[in-house]
Amino acid sequence: MIEYDSANRPPAVIDEFIQLIHYRDLIFLMVGNILKNRYKRSVLGIFWMLLNPLLQTVVLTIAFGTMFKSSLPNYAVYLLSGLLAWNFITQTTQYAMGAMAYGGGLLKRIYIPRATYIVAAVGNGLINLLVSIGSLVIIILFLAHPITVAWLFLPVSILILTIFSLGLALLLSTASVFFTDTVDIYQVLVQALFFLTPIMYPASILPAELSQVLALNPFVILIEIFRIPIYTNHFPDFNLVISAISLALITLVAGWILFTSKADQLAYRL
């Protein structure tokens, strides 16, 4: 049993982190429960993580592959590498928001670190991403797309995506507790951003005025940092890496400060 003395608390930004470490076993348990609950009624179970990206890729490749065949050889690799990064960020943040907005009743009954739900959601998303990379490997082998030393950068790319997703989940989950409409607004925004992000198409086809707008889309940098080692077989440009790391860290710091500053109010808002 972990004793919690509320009279001798360090600053909230530090205290929440310390409590997460103390409750790490609970976080691992919650990640496992999320996976079990998500796939317990599925015939394929966890193998759906592999099959779902493959089906998405096949359908979208049939629909758009011919259109971009000349500019994007091995289009399925380009598409799926972008989809995996996109799905990891958006699905993780959406799940975290839903868990906090609609499933946080436990926080009213017992003390657990308020960020537990969000960290568990990100952990679950990370497992989904790692398993789904198996689908990408299957397509790469089928298309005889090379796997080079640039893949060694992939753990860095995944770490950057994870840091950004955690920060964004903290920001949006805090907003969703105080304003439940945030969940619906974010879902609409995600649908719009999907078509404004070069996942299914190359950025080069956009006119100049839209290219400037694209530069304001943070998802572009994050998807490219994941896709470049896989699709182009090169290490990402140094400036792109610095930009992606900066974006991820700024998002995490902002999310952590906002979330921890409101942590004591969350249980009363749920």
Image (tube, helix red, strand yellow):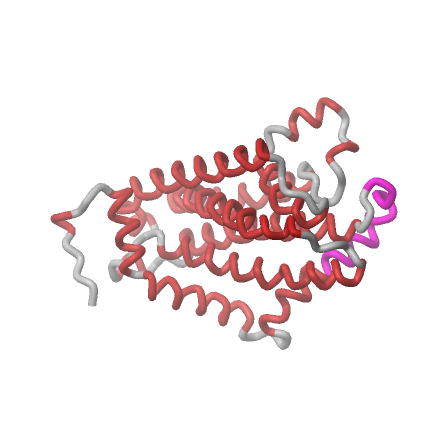
Q: Residue furthest bottom?
A: 43
Q: Is residue 158 left or right of residue 197?
A: left
Q: Find out whether residue 5 is within the magenta segment.
A: no
Q: Nearer the viewer, residue 120 or 269?
A: 120
State the count of labels: 0
Q: Is residue 179 visible?
A: no
Magenta region: which residues?
55-71
Q: Is residue 238 in sight in this rendering?
A: yes
| Residue occupying the point 50% across, 35% down | 247
Between 183 and 64, the one lying in front of the other is: 64
| Residue at the left extreme, as displayed | 7
Picture coordinates of residue 15, whole percent (x, y): 24, 48
- Asked if the stretch drawn in magenta spans residue 62, the answer is yes
Left or right of 65? Residue 187 is left
Up/down of 195 relative to 28, above or below:
above
Question: x and y percent of residue 198 in the render?
Answer: 70, 39
Relative to 2, residue 75 above or below: above
Question: Residue at left 68%, top 36%?
Answer: 196
